Amino acid sequence: MSSIALLGNPNTGKTSLFNTLTSSYEYVGNWAGVTVEKKVGDLKNGAGTLIDLPGIYSLHPLSRDEGVATQYLLEEAPEALVNIVDASQLERNLMLTVQLLEYGRPTLIGLNMVDVAKSRGIIVDPEALQRRLGVTVLPLVARTGKGSSQVLSMLENSADIPPVTFRLDYGPVVEQAVSAIERELGSIPGLPNSRWVALQFLEQNPVISQVLTGKSDLQKLTAIRNSCQSELQIKKLALTLPQWIRSIRTQYIRNLCQDALDASGIKPHNLTERLDIVLTNRYLGLPIFLAFMYVLFKTTFEWVGAPLSDLLDGLISGPISSGATSLLDSIGASDFLHALIVDGIIGGVGGVIVFVPQIFILFLIISFVEDSGYMARVSLVMDSIMERMGLNGKAFIPFIIGFGCNVPAIMAARSIEQPKDRMLTTLLLPLMSCSARLPVYLLFAAVFFPANQAAVIMTMYALGIVFALLLCKLFSKYLFKNESSVFVIELPPYRMPQLKSLSRSTWEKGKGFLRKAGTIILAGSVIIWIMSYVGPSGVNVDMDHSFLAKFGGLIAPLLQPLGFGFWQAGSTLVPGFLAKEVVVSTMSIIYNTQEGASLNALISQMFTPLSSVSFMVFILLYTPCLATVGVIKKETASWKWTLFSIGYAVALAYIVSLVIYQGGRLLGFA
């Protein structure tokens, strides 16, 4: 089966086309850096495999995700390439196109966003592009699927895509160096187009140099490159060799655009510019963002989400629970099985499921923000604040993604160019309030702060960001000294998200929560219930004498200074390492065994408003979940940094909760 690589600049619609051509669904957003690793799908017509590579501006990688594309082209050698080009940003996009054509594989160019270009008064002539580049150019509107059938038809037999004959002349000095390097590379098996490899080496592409290490005489190749650069400097043609190569490509692209592009009637992004005057204003941008976040939380947790969760709670605790009881009675189920299903499974999993409406509403609004183009503006607005703390605004995008789940947020940090910023972001992302922590906030806010639920939950989210920025300042000063930060971000035009895209994006974010409910939370609920049912003296013991109570009692003394030094609280924290949702399911099981009182009423007896705040903050800050720890290890490739992320989080959680509770007592809030 043939493999076809899909490449293009960030935010050009690659992933939208990938979803259409493969009947897959991958994450789509209106901001640069959505795809951070290669994604694979089978073409609808069964003709081959399509590989969606991260968006890149050049084959010379600036960040880890960009290196994925060059590495793939070197090691996998696809049968054909599909290059997606933004018709409204043609000149900039063609820089990558030239490098891909030099790769030499059969190539198809998808001229995407022709509707956006037309609305701005930009007319692109596909035939002129096709004639000058020597490859097929197909107009597209990937968001709606227009033109995708023609692309699929062309890919039905990739062998029928015409070979690439494209070749740029870089002048006698560079061409002589290219030929010399090609001769040196001739004996190396498995390399793609040797001219392309030579040009990439002359541009000082680090991925190329890494691959050639050990396979060729790197000192000799470097000497050829240095000699070429010296000759260019002597002849005063360019200061550096990469600058000269880029200037040749730039001049070719400008000449090409003169033939294929009519921008005489260009119109500005009127709506985008008018909105940006307000939304990215130096003084108004941050207050508007904070106001938006407040409305988001009010909508999610009070105006819309709370009534829906109450209905679901009534359904689970009423008809579902009583129906399960009746069914078990009718089949003569044992007391053990009855208690396991009703108290353990329905009580434990149901205690978490009741928050699904609020979680999906939150994901829906976040998806709207991402697809509308506002996400990139938030990064711009936050840049000045984050820069003072040692990061740049681009790191704020993974922070927002972390509100859904820390795992994809850490993977999104790959798009950050500077290693220091990428490492800092990875280490700090577990402090973001993911959806797994949300049931804890919702439960305690409903019990102790019913009139201000949205404000309390927003405060928890804000605290995560505040502590992340404070630690960022600390880590930057002592762990990553003398490392600079650069902020470059593309601001896409605003657009109205499509209902289909919003619904799919929301579902993809939310189904992970549901999947956990059916796996980790279910398994955890069964284990926790059995531990509460069994004790040293036998089965069906009083819960205070169960193995769960013994286990929680070991931790309880350490938690006493924090305001929740009882075994029930201690027994929830350790299984919470597997998934934070298990904290609520464990509480549901523990308190569900006491007849005649609701979970909320029993929690109000065990906690006070002050100790509830201390507990919520501890849940916010303490050790990342198991999946997050795994991805930190993968991204940092270091046990040292992974263990550091766990250690500092536990220490921070303990210290902050201690200050909140003991400080609150001194101020008379106990």
Image (cartoon, rainbow, N blue to C red):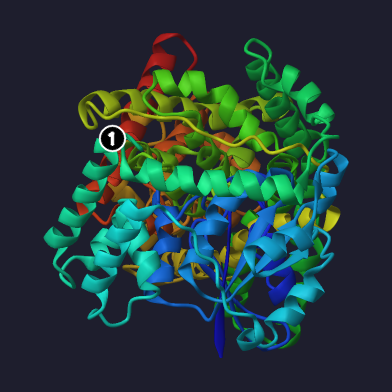
Q: Residue at x 30, y 44 (%)?
A: 645
Left or right position of 63 against 503? left
The answer to whether residue 519 of the structure is visible from this angle is yes
Above or below, comparing residue 365 to residue 635 in the picture: above
Q: Pinpoint residue 184: horizontal percent, then vertical percent.
A: 21, 71
Any part of residue 567 in sight: no
For mark 1, does the 10 Å Cα neighbourhood hold few (<14), some (14 to 19), or many (20 or more) residues? few
- Measured along the vertical axis of the image, is residue 440 above or below residue 145? above
Residue appearing at x 65%, y 27% in the figure: 449
Element marked by disc 1: helix
440 or 129: which is nearer to us? 129
Query: Viewed as shown, does residue 296 lie left or right of 319?
Result: left
Quarter of the figure with residue 550: bottom left
- Give the percent coordinates (x, y) of residue 124: 79, 51
Of 241 and 55, which appears nearest the observer? Answer: 241
Estimate the x, y position of residue 323 in percent, counting from the top left.
79, 72
Q: Name the residue under label 1.
A: 651
In the picture, measured across the screen, residue 540 lies left or right of residue 637, that is right
Query: Type of residue at label 1?
Result: Ala
Q: Which residue is at the front of the view, 88 or 314?
A: 88
Residue 373 image offset from top left, x and y in percent = 71, 38
From this view, report whether residue 575 is shown above or below residue 307: below
